[in-house]
């Protein structure tokens, strides 16, 4: 009996231990499957969603291999307390059998304006595990209609006469106004007498606003709200100010700037455009929800007080002046004496506003001078070491009324003074001291592109009448997060990556601009040509959504998409040359489709489809026998003359090739959206265009297109305009042209991306390497050799802009070619990944990573005389095909074990699921 009891105890102990091991194992597995990066409409915890059925997404983390989601469940509630016991009063999706983890459309109860919604998600995987519930994320609805703004009114200090409004000036138009406008401040006192649950302010200020509460700036945004087509749209911003409200007295303060809404005609200041939509104005609604369930609202109306601000001049093109003696201490705090202020006037404005659903512009980096020098005039010139978009921060000490002028520039003259000739002159920051110790100032409503600063009126000397304590540059850009990195064993490629990156960063604001100084305009060709380079590096889906909207708002009644969006000016030089180029306007078709390919966004296709249809009808009406010859062609190619309109490629080649590409894309979009008849119409039209293109431009005797330029042959190849039997010969002529020029490029703004795309897809990255791993001919290395720190406007790094966005196409190849991160043509959003690193030239190492919609994809390869290694990380819920050159080894190991490998052409093909892998070839 005693033995039986002993055995029973041992058996019980054994089963308890086994149960504990199993429980720990289960918990370990569950914990090993976790969710992160919850998004609503691409954004984290956004405020101001105006979409009735917003889309949700999440990412999955697991330490295992071949993990895929098989089901999910989403809970949405209007209070966080409800979600704690895993209940949902707005939407419980139930357990949905699906691997979809991006672009999941909300399908619950009707969403209400201004309401905050709380959500979380749980998933099940293909290994029988379930995750824990995710952390709770939120989104807050915005204002759907004019009624949601309730009693809020547009208010201003003064109004612009209707006769002076000029929404689309021509470049040669004469001025009707000859004075500066007043930059106003507004204030409003209000009281909060109960305990606050949540407080949100929705505000729009045109052109830009800065909001303060009780003397402190709300948020850290710069140039809110983003610029847009102001005659058709105004943007507002939502701020959660729950923690900033004080019990009792509170005060709102608002300062307004001009931006593109009003460009003042002041002599002695640079002004590219003469647009005048109106004088600065604002509208806002504050909603305060109290813990007892009651609500308080505050609206902008004529009871708000207004006065001129210390900003005496502000222009998006000319700079900004500030007189500290005009400051009114405590103006945006309670108990201020506002008796000398006047009531705001009520003005007309948009009745329906749109939320700013891009990341805001912010100050992202700062630069201290690396060198300073006094020039003959007595001014001091400071070198910040980096050309970037930005403003200054000035610290000075002096007497009341002393004035400091700062002129920023990209370049220097021979005498060491700043040179604004190619970037817009004169552009000036100025500050008038109040004489109260050390004074610190930075501009609020203007920015420029610069590396150098020339200071007049203050000196960096302790005994100076006006002492310059410090000056630094503050880099501003859209605050989209960085999601891609690249590095290699080649210093020049690393420097080129940085060169292009600074051009991208300096031209990401609320639109993708061409340059951060002379124009600041949204030229459209760069949006599709540079789009992939930008997407590898930055989380910019919201910016591309806004770009599509800007094009919709700028489309003309006849269907034309102008070359600039938002369109603020009509350039008349050369007729419609600077308004009607298919290579530019085709962003209206290509960008929505690329958004679908990169992010799986079908909604943007649906929203853009009417614009696409109208633009294709316009192009058809302009075509002569299906050939489009208008516009700029291969802008800034390398020809015998100074850069400009296409020199080496005849007009009609690039425009018609893009037209054919548009039709191919339109056919695909129509099929995705279920418009079968449209798809057939576009397919038929594409065939007609292809036939006309080949009849017009293919030279059978030379087996090339048109002049045989790099652009002509590359675009014909990329767009699949070349008949299959001629493809090999045309490709060889492209390669021959490059090699005959000792690997020098000639393609311009339009053609160079396609040269790179064709060479990479045809397995000739060795040619790309040879073209770009040099500094003796115009190109990236040449620009670096000339001292550029951001991408220049021309390949030659001449006297043009030294911070331009349009020619940075090589960045795409650094990620897709050298790092080898691509996606399959059979899927979207990197659900099916291709890892195919190009091991070329004398490179011994390259690495890259990209935070895809499903998670981080990373590669790192190293090559020695004896071995090739490739580290790969594949995110959960995806799979990958690994392609490795057979010349790198005969034996393959995967995570230490020899594996057989399928062959595809001259590559080894290995198929894997999620996980971390080490491949070795020797």
Image (spheres, grey):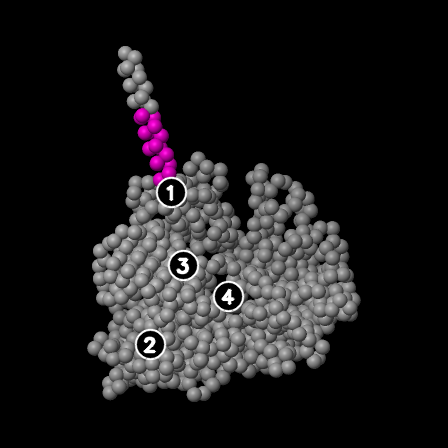
Which marked residue is nearer to the observer: mark 4 or mark 3?
3
Side of 712 where 82 appears, left or right: right
In the rendered image, is residue 608 in sight? no
Which marked residue is nearer to the observer: mark 4 or mark 1?
1
Disc 1 residue crowd, few under 14, some 14–19, many 20+, Cα 10 Å: some
Horizontal and vertical percent position of residue 243:
60, 46
Q: CA distance from mark 1 to mark 2?
A: 48 Å
- The quadrant in which the C terminus is found is bottom left
Say which of 830 and 411 sits in front: 411
Which numbered marker is on residue 811?
none
Which numbered marker is on residue 505?
4
Q: CA distance from mark 3 to mark 2?
A: 29 Å
Which numbered marker is on residue 849?
3
Q: Quadrant of residue 551?
A: bottom left
Magenta run includes residue 23: yes
Magenta run includes residue 173: no
Say which of 420 and 623 sits in front: 420
Side of 167 where 535 appears, left or right: left
């Amino acid at each position: 009996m005693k033995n039986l009891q002993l055995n029973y105890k041992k058996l019980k102990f054994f089963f308890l231990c086994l149960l504990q091991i199993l429980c720990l194992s289960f918990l370990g597995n569950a914990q090993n499957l976790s969710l992160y990066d919850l998004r609503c409409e691409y954004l984290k915890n956004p405020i101001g969603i105006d979409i009735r059925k917003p889309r949700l997404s999440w990412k999955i983390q697991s330490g295992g291999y071949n993990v895929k989601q098989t089901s999910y469940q989403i809970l949405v509630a209007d209070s966080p307390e409800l979600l704690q016991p895993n209940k949902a009063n707005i939407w419980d999706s139930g357990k949905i059998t699906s691997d979809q983890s991006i672009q999941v459309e909300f399908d619950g109860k009707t969403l209400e304006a201004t309401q905050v919604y709380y959500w979380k998600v749980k998933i099940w995987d293909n290994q029988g595990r379930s995750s824990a519930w995710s952390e709770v994320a939120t989104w807050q609805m915005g204002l759907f209609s004019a009624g949601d703004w309730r009693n809020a009114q547009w208010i201003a200090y003064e109004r612009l006469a209707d006769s002076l409004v000029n929404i689309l000036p021509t470049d040669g138009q004469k001025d009707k106004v000859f004075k500066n406008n007043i930059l106003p401040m507004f204030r409003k006192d209000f009281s909060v007498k109960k305990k606050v649950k949540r407080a949100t302010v929705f505000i729009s200020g045109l052109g830009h606003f800065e909001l303060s509460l009780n003397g402190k700036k709300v948020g850290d945004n710069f140039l809110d709200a983003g610029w847009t087509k102001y005659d058709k749209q105004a943007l507002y911003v939502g701020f959660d100010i729950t923690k900033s409200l004080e019990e009792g007295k509170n005060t709102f303060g608002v300062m307004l700037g001009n931006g593109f809404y009003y460009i003042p005609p002041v002599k002695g200041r640079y002004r590219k455009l003469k647009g005048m939509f109106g004088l600065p104005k604002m509208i806002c609604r504050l909603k305060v929800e109290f813990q007892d369930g009651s609500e308080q609202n505050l609206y902008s109306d004529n009871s708000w007080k207004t006065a001129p601000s210390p900003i005496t001049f502000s222009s998006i093109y000319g700079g900004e002046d500030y007189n500290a003696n005009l400051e009114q201490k405590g103006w945006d705090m309670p108990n201020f004496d506002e008796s000398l202020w006047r009531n705001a006037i009520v003005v007309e404005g948009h009745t329906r506003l749109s939320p700013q659903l891009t990341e805001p512009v912010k100050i992202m980096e700062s630069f201290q001078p690396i060198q300073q020098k006094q020039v003959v005039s007595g001014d001091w010139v400071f070198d910040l070491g980096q050309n970037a978009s930005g403003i200054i921060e000035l610290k000075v000490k002096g007497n009341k009324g002393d004035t400091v002028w700062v002129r920023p520039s990209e370049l220097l003259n021979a005498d060491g003074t700043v040179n604004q000739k190619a970037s817009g002159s004169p552009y000036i920051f100025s500050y008038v001291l109040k004489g109260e110790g050390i004074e610190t100032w930075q501009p609020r409503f203007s920015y420029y592109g610069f590396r150098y600063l020339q200071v007049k009126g203050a000196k960096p000397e302790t005994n100076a009448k006006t002492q310059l304590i410090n000056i630094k540059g503050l880099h501003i850009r859209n605050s989209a997060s960085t999601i891609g990195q690249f590095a290699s064993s080649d210093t020049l490629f690393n420097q080129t990556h940085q060169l292009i990156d600074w051009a991208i960063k300096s031209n990401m604001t609320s639109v993708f601009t061409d340059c951060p100084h002379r124009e600041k305009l949204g030229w459209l060709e760069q949006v599709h040509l540079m789009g992939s380079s930008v997407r590898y590096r930055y989380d910019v889906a919201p910016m591309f959504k806004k770009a599509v909207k800007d094009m919709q708002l700028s489309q003309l009644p006849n269907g034309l998409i102008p070359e600039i969006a938002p369109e603020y000016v009509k350039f008349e030089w050369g007729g419609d040359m600077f308004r009607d180029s298919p290579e530019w306007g085709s962003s209206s078709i290509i960008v929505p489709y690329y958004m679908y390919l990169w992010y799986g966004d079908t909604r943007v296709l649906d929203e853009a489809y009417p614009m696409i249809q109208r633009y294709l009808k316009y192009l058809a009406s302009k075509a002569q026998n299906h050939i489009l010859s208008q516009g700029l062609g291969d802008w800034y190619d390398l020809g015998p003359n100074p850069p400009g309109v296409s020199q080496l490629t005849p007009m009609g080649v690039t425009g018609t090739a893009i037209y054919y590409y548009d039709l191919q894309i339109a056919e695909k979009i129509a099929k995705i959206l279920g418009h079968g008849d449209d798809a057939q119409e576009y397919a038929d039209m594409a065939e007609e265009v292809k036939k006309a293109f080949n009849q017009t431009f293919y030279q059978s005797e030379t087996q090339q297109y048109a002049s045989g330029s790099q652009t002509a042959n590359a675009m014909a190849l990329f767009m699949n305009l070349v008949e299959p039997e001629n493809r090999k010969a045309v490709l060889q002529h492209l390669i021959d042209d490059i090699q005959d020029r000792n690997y020098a490029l000639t393609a311009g703004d339009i053609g160079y991306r396609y040269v790179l795309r064709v060479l990479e897809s045809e397995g000739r990255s060795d040619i790309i390497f040879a073209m770009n791993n040099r500094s003796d001919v115009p190109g990236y290395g040449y620009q670096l050799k000339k001292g550029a720190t951001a991408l220049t406007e021309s390949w030659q790094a001449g006297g043009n802009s030294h911070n331009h966005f349009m020619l940075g196409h090589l960045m795409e190849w650094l990620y897709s070619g050298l790092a080898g991160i691509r996606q399959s043509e059979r899927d979207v959003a990197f659900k099916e990944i291709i890892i195919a690193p190009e091991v070329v030239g004398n490179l011994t190492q390259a690495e890259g990573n990209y935070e895809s919609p499903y998670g981080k994809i990373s590669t790192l390869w190293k090559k020695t005389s004896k071995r090739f290694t490739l580290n790969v990380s594949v995110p959960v819920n995806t799979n990958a095909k690994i392609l490795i050159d057979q010349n790198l080894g005969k034996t393959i190991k995967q995570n230490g074990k020899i594996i057989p490998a399928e062959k595809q052409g001259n590559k080894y093909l290995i198929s894997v699921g999620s996980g971390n892998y080490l491949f070795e070839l020797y």
